[in-house]
Image (spheres, rainbow, N blue to C red):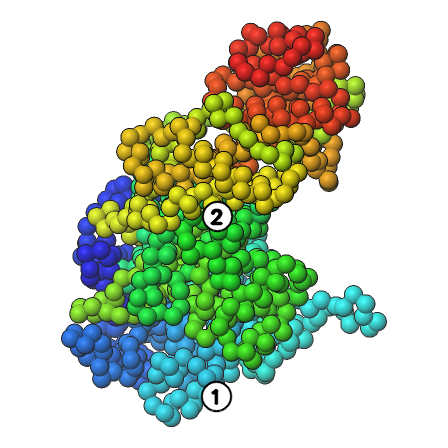
Amino acid sequence: MTSQSLIINSPYEMPAQHWSQDANGKIAQVAEGRRPAAYEMYDTRNNTRRVELLETVNRVRQRVDEWRAAGWPGITMVTRALLEHWDARGEWIAEARRWQGGPRQYPFYFCQLEAIETLIWWLEAPPDYRQGIFLPGDGGAWERICSKMATGSGKTTVMGLIATWQTLNALQYPKDSRFSHAIFVVTPGLTVKSRLQVLLPGDEKNVYDEFSMCPTEAMRQRLNQMEIRVENWHTLMPLKEPARSVVKKGKESDEAFTRRVLGRLAGFKDLIVFNDEAHHAYRQRAEVKVGRKEAEALGIDLEEATRWIEGLDRIHKTRRIRRCFDLSATPFAPTGKTNTEAGLYEWIISDFGLNDAIEAGLVKTPRVVIRDDALANAKSYASKLYHLYREDEVRDDLNRKADSTDPLPKLVQNAYALLAYDWRETQKAWQAEGHTIPPVMLTVCNRTETAARIERFFNEGDCIIEGTQAQEYTLRVDSKVLEKAERGEKVTKDKEYAARLEQVIKAAGLPADKQNELLALKQEEQLRALVDTVGKRGRPGQQLQNVVSVAMLSEGWDAANVTHIMGLRAFTSQLLCEQVIGRGLRRVAHDMDEQGYFLPEFVNVFGVPLSIFQEVGEGGETPPVPKASVRIEVEPDRNGYEIRWPNVVRIQSVLKPELRVDWPAVEPLALDPNATPINAEIAPSLTGIVNLAQASAIDLESAAQDFRLQNLIFRATRKLYRELDSGFEGDTQYLAIQLIRLVEQFLASDKLTIPAQWYAEPARRRLLIGLNIDAVVTHVSRYIRQSNTTRLEPLFDEQLPIGSTSAMRPWLTTKPCEPTSRSQISHAVHDSTWEKAVVAVCETSDDVAAWAKNDHLDFVVRYLWEGSSRRFVPDFLIKLRNGRTLVLEVKGQDSDLNRAKRAAMAEWVEAINLAGGFGSWCFDTVFDPARTRDVIACHAEARSVALSP
């Protein structure tokens, strides 16, 4: 064990110690003895955490330990020969750091031996050892037994051990109902199905030979009599009758279904079933009402779960299933309740969880962000990098339909700068060690639009860390294409996406014949080939270094070279966090120290909270009684109060050929160091319990080369060019030259300020500028357009060019509200007492013909803030009796953000009025509700609009 490692146990011995936790869930010290089998439950509604002991598993562990110590009494001769062979390991040579003299290069892990021993104990141990132990079922007609094993702990090997034990005993004792040599393996998709071909005795890379599972050659030859079939669950779907079939065959019978699904295996009865990733095989009970949203949070497709189980039930009717062996790292089932996250399968018989795997070094140790040098989250006081999607500016920006050209939120760009820099340093270290396969940075995000923005962010060079702009080594996983590929279904070809896949394939370094063979495949087959082979030498995905996915990628995705993970989605359950991090847990190497402990490997994680639990003070008030709701709707008899508006996607500024900026009139731009993380500390973590004593840092001050002044000027100019070139009336090459000059002038001027002397040092100043490059671009762009715009051209929403109060859909609210009389909307919702005062004026003023509170109306004006496209939703739309439409905003305080909104609104009003056809529009802001009547009267008299307080 090293000083910077959580590894405290040998992978080949029963765990002798574990990291203990204090009452607050923090790592305290190393405690003697094995950690009891348990799992943590999180109630996100009340923000509470509790530990649930797996009482049955803990009792079974004790019985199995006693049975093992007694020499495995009650077992068959075949089983004894197998156990003795599997338990043999040879001698540990500390100087050479390897095992010598055993039947295989590496002994079986303790967790693998315990899993198979426990199953053998359940079926073969004398009744005295099993007295008082009861495993509930799932309510079905056939027995299920679950082995819970963490990702990376070797479930495939355990399946091979079970198959060997069952087959050899069934052939030796054909009348013993405990055994069967007819095995049906069900997987969650084609990826896992492909990986589990090693369970076929005739496969070139079968596990039986690779791990020397048979004590003698005679046993190995006999094992070839195993009847085994591996299928993905989609084969269990009922057969659809062709829509245009002339002959109507009717519904597929159970016998026909069995023959189709099992093939040659249909010739046998009394099957055993392996459910790999068994949390997908969930039998929904009639008394448990489970919503689709709850199921999705647990990674369960309700249709998949139902069809999987229904298919096995049909096979049981015709051939009998003796028992089913479930294997899963996360065998959780939805409870249908809101006060618990989920419930584990009740038929779990053994457990080796993620914390156990980390402590034994079987998997990489996750390192999460514990702090950075920017301001923390105001509620949790945790680093914003710990759970990025929780931040309002990130969630609001990413949770919208956006164009791929829209910049990512500033905080996300800063997070990528830190993570990408650390990834690049890891890549250099790997290259120095002679690795030919690069480390991989994996992003799991919330929607396809976000994935497209991230892909463009890297491919267009917007990530400031050099070496990350590598289109041919960056793969955006189209989740819809991959999902259909996993099912073996066809997809409609996307030419642009197909071209990207072709680019990646051609850069993979494959021999010409292999490359041509891959290029001839269908798009979905190409994607599967790339995704399934990330990090595998000589395969299509060997050179990929950046993978962006909306889904979590399929189970069985075992890219061992994932070293960095970025989470940009909601994490509402502890299970979801573990499943995402699980994609990066597989080890690259299995080198050991003198003690026989694995050397630590790490996966650095941003944005995925290993614990969703937030510490709060003890106690708390009783939850309030739920409030009554009010239905807000369009009144059908108030068409005369309808207000219509143009839906504008953006305002295009048409610029002069010769650009200039009135620098004295430019307001200073202050960069805020508190909002810009330059370094972050990461620490190894169990499931949400970090060890602060082993923290290490990622510091961008070491990346000064990436923040050279010329590099910053180039990046700012490129962003400005993209923004302004469509509206430039001169030569675009001359536009680029002018923009370089203006950016240089701005960066060298006193118009860029940093309110901290420590950041005045040139290298730190460049760091701050580089991490705020979008804010710089937005500021410079504003004054370029202000001084050089010849006209404004609104670009309208092609699908819905006109919005209207009459189109609002009904909705419910528990907020304070009151009925209206001069509005087409039935009620006005009060978000503040100031808004209530404005409502009173709108209802009584003689200058107001109609009005509406802009709530659920979808009247928005887009504006740029710190590089992100944001939505400004003004508070009120007021139609005045003089024909003008007043957009009114109510504000208690002013800020730079509010000034940016007003500037965007003023530009919108000017563009719409110039375009004509939409009536006369005006805008104002009320900073004092007492002035509401004055503001309305001002515009009713058609006087000029005042945009400042």
Q: Report the amino acid beneath label 2.
A: Asp
* 175 shown above or below 159: below
Q: Nearer the viewer, residue 129 or 592?
A: 592
* 828 shown above or below 555: above
Q: Position of residue 569 (x, y in %)?
A: 48, 46
Left or right placement of residue 433 versus residue 710 in this view: left
Q: For the point 22% across and 66% down, which residue is it?
A: 597
Q: Earlier in the sequence, mark 2 or mark 1?
A: 1
Q: Is residue 889 visible?
A: yes
Is there a contact, CB below 8 Å, between mark 2 and mark 1? no
Q: For the point 47% across and 23% down, which residue is it?
A: 664
Q: How far apart are the alpha carbons under marks 2 and 1?
A: 58 Å
Quarter of the image where one finds residue 91: bottom left
Quarter of the image where one finds residue 589: bottom left
Report the residue marked by disc 1.
Answer: 225
Q: Report the amino acid beneath label 1.
A: Gln
Q: Secondary structure at mark 2?
A: loop
Outermost residue toward the left? Answer: 95
Q: Position of residue 437 (x, y in %)?
A: 40, 68
Outermost residue toward the bottom? Answer: 218
Q: For the point 25% across and 80% down, which residue is it?
A: 88
Quarter of the image where one finds residue 787: top right
Q: Which mark is residue 50?
A: none
Q: Nearer the viewer, residue 318 or 214?
A: 214
Q: For the point 23% across and 69% down, which residue is it?
A: 592
Q: Which mark is residue 462?
A: 2
Q: Position of residue 9 (x, y in %)?
A: 23, 63
Q: Nearer the viewer, residue 173 or 300?
A: 300
Judged by depth in the image, the label closer to the viewer, 2 or 1, is 2
Left or right placement of residue 31 versus residue 321 in this view: left
Q: Is residue 316 visible?
A: no
